[in-house]
Image (cartoon, helix red, strand yellow):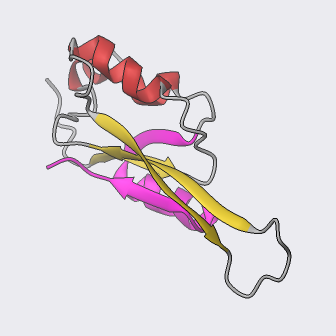
Amino acid sequence: MADYSNYGLLVDYKYCDNCGSCVVGCQEIKDLPAGKSGIQVFEKGPFRKDNDTLDDRWDWDYIPVPTDLCDLCAARLDEGEKPMCVKHCLTFCLDFGPVEELAKKSEKLGEKVAIYKPM
């Protein structure tokens, strides 16, 4: 198994729509029961945006968060494949790669971006 200690997951959650495909993909590859997964999607909101006077200006986010069961699908990485959550993300809000590259990419993406690096 290669060394993936400098790799991580980029989460651009402004596009997550809580479809759950990342969770199901992870459960399938790891053969986990319902309620357990290497990634979970949390809901934040709805909140009225600050300094906005229009009635339809709400902030409502779904945030994919890797759990302690996430190992970035190391066995798949050894086969040259992406982690299951990245492969199955329908909105392409998940990405995988070296943390340094993900940090550069996150600067360009702006707000509502997080980088996860497993321990």
> Residue 76: where, in percent of width, then height?
30, 18
Name the image quarter holding residue 9: top left
**In the image, is 40 to the left or to the right of 53?**
left
Name the image quarter holding residue 17: top right
**Of 100 and 119, the residue lying toward us:** 119
> Residue 15: where, in percent of width, then height?
63, 47
At x 55%, y 63%, the residue is 112
Query: Looking at the picture, does residue 100 appear above or below residue 36?
Result: below
**In the image, is 51 to the left or to the right of 10?**
right
> Residue 7: where, in percent of width, then height?
30, 45
Quadrant holding the N terminus:
top left
Query: Looking at the picture, does residue 48 appear above or below residue 9?
Result: below
Would residue 82 be seen by someone viewing this image from the given angle?
no
> Residue 91: where, in percent of width, then height?
63, 35
At x 46%, y 30%, the residue is 86
At x 51%, y 60%, the residue is 113
Q: Which residue is most to the bottom?
A: 51
Query: Looking at the picture, does residue 54 appear above or below residue 69?
Result: below
* Residues drawn in magenta: 93-119
**In the image, is 55 to the left or to the right of 47?**
right
Query: Looking at the picture, does residue 104 appear above or below residue 3?
Result: below
**Of 30 and 19, the residue lying toward us:** 19
**Residue 103 is covered by the magenta coloring:** yes
**Of 42 and 95, the residue lying toward us:** 42
**Residue 108 is covered by the magenta coloring:** yes
Would residue 18 be seen by someone viewing this image from the given angle?
yes
**In the image, is 88 to the left or to the right of 69?**
right
